[in-house]
Image (cartoon, rainbow, N blue to C red):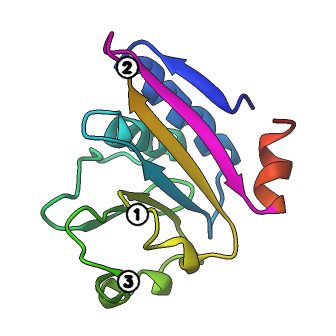
Amino acid sequence: MNREHVLPTPEDTHELGRSLADVLRAGDLVVLAGPLGAGKTALTQGIGAGLGVREPVTSPTFVIARVHRGGRVPLVHVDAYRLGGVADVDDLDLDASTDESVTVVEWGQGLVERLADEHLEVRLDRRDDDVRTAVLVPHGPGWDERLGPG
């Protein structure tokens, strides 16, 4: 799988998410990094679609975490933007569901990596011409293997 992507449309971002869902399995942690409007929620919507989630995947900004069931594996979607630190992450008790779910965390860099031995970081950005980009950064040999040559 390519590690660098140019995403001219929201549909391209969704499609990248659907492609990622093909390699995701229970216990996976995906950390999304990037500024507002970079496509974090759109990517997660694509992941949800790829996992077979039937309900709408919306930003969990105000509820902090949502669990979506009904797909081949549950999707836990977390927005860590308003969390103050690691103690707030602990209060969410996310590690109780990480083994049987795919956990996608927006704004989670530096806060949630310890929830799993390995994780995939997706660095999203929005260029001046409004085109989004994504760089897949594997953390751990399992992710290197699943993504293939970089």
Give the Cα separation between the discs numbered 1 and 2.
22 Å
Q: Taking 43 as reference, is 26 above or below it?
A: below
In the picture of the structure, the residue carrying the numbered disc 1 is 108
- Amino acid type at image mark 1: Gly
Lateral position of residue 69 relative to residue 27, left or right: left
Which of disc 2 and disc 3 is earlier in sequence? 3
Question: Which residue appears at 22% of the width and 58% of the height?
Answer: 60
In the picture of the structure, the residue carrying the numbered disc 3 is 86
Q: Within 10 angstroms of label 3, few (less than 14), some, or many (20 or more) residues? A: few
SS label for mark 1: loop
Q: Do the CB atoms of the residues marked 1 and 2 lie less than 8 Å apart?
A: no
Question: Which residue appears at 43% of the width and 49% of the height?
Answer: 33
Task: Residue 17: give x, y in percent of width and height.
Answer: 51, 36
Give the Cα separation between the discs numbered 1 and 3.
10 Å
- Amino acid type at image mark 2: Arg
Report if residue 77 is visible in the image. yes
Q: Which residues are magenta?
A: 127-140
- Between 44 and 119, the one lying in front of the other is 119
Q: Taking 114 as reference, is 74 above or below it?
A: above
Which of disc 2 and disc 1 is earlier in sequence? 1
Asked if residue 134 is among those painted magenta in the image, a careful observer would answer yes
Q: Within 10 angstroms of label 2, few (less than 14), some, or many (20 or more) residues? A: few
Q: Is the N terminus in the top left, top right, bottom left or bottom right quadrant?
A: top right
Q: Nearer the viewer, mark 1 or mark 2?
A: 2
- Between 111 and 56, the one lying in front of the other is 111
- Amino acid type at image mark 3: Val
Q: Do the CB atoms of the residues marked 1 and 3 lie less than 8 Å apart?
A: no
In the picture of the structure, the residue carrying the numbered disc 2 is 127
Q: Quadrant of residue 118?
A: bottom right
